[in-house]
Image (cartoon, rainbow, N blue to C red):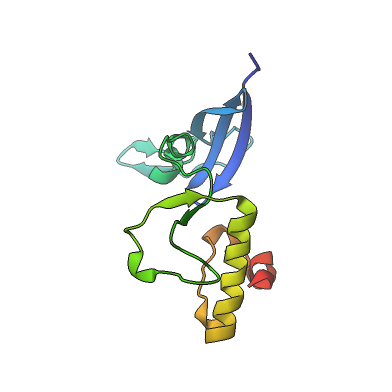
Amino acid sequence: MEETRRFTNLTTGGPVHVYVRDGKIIRITPLELSPEDGPSWTIHARGRAFTPPRRTTLSNWTVAHKSTIYSPKRILTPLKRVDFDPKGKRNIHRRGESGYEPISWDEALDIVAEEMIRLKREYGPAAIMTTPSSHHLWGNVGYRFRAYNRFM
């Protein structure tokens, strides 16, 4: 059995330690601050001192990352609607009714790329609206010159 390794990750849901053994996540915990880290605040009131614990707080979705990653309901391969032909009949009236078939990642990426080109050509560049997650927006330089903007 491999030894447990600890990784530090900063998500939009808070900074965490991720513990991994044999390539699998075994635990996700809030980042615990060391004495070398900056001091916490302290409020003195009515003869008592109140100081927060020396660890970070996490969002509910960050705490659920492990169960999301290993969920049996997680889709691991791209799926395409069985009656959808990206170069022909799209059968939009069948959305939500017809089944799905697995396709390769290459085919899925080709479909997405072709659709982006088609939408821009038919409706103009404003036809595609996207928003990146907020952690890509830290700082003006990151916001204005990030790879995401160059891609779009």
Give coordinates of residue 48: x percent, y percent: 34, 36
Give left or right: position of 73 versus 132: left
* Front residue (pair 30, 60): 60
Extreme-top residue of the structure = 1
Q: Residue at x 51, y 81 (%)?
A: 127
Q: How many labels were placed on the picture? A: 0
- Quadrant where the C terminus is found in the figure: bottom right
- Quadrant where the N terminus is found in the figure: top right
Give coordinates of residue 4: x percent, y percent: 62, 21
- The answer to whether one can see residue 141 in this image is no
- The answer to whether one can see residue 103 in this image is yes
Give coordinates of residue 141: x percent, y percent: 68, 69
Is residue 101 positioned above or below 26 on the image? Answer: below
* Front residue (pair 143, 47): 143
Q: Residue at x 62, y 29 (%)?
A: 6
Q: Residue at x 50, y 32 (%)?
A: 28
Give coordinates of residue 93: x percent, y percent: 33, 70
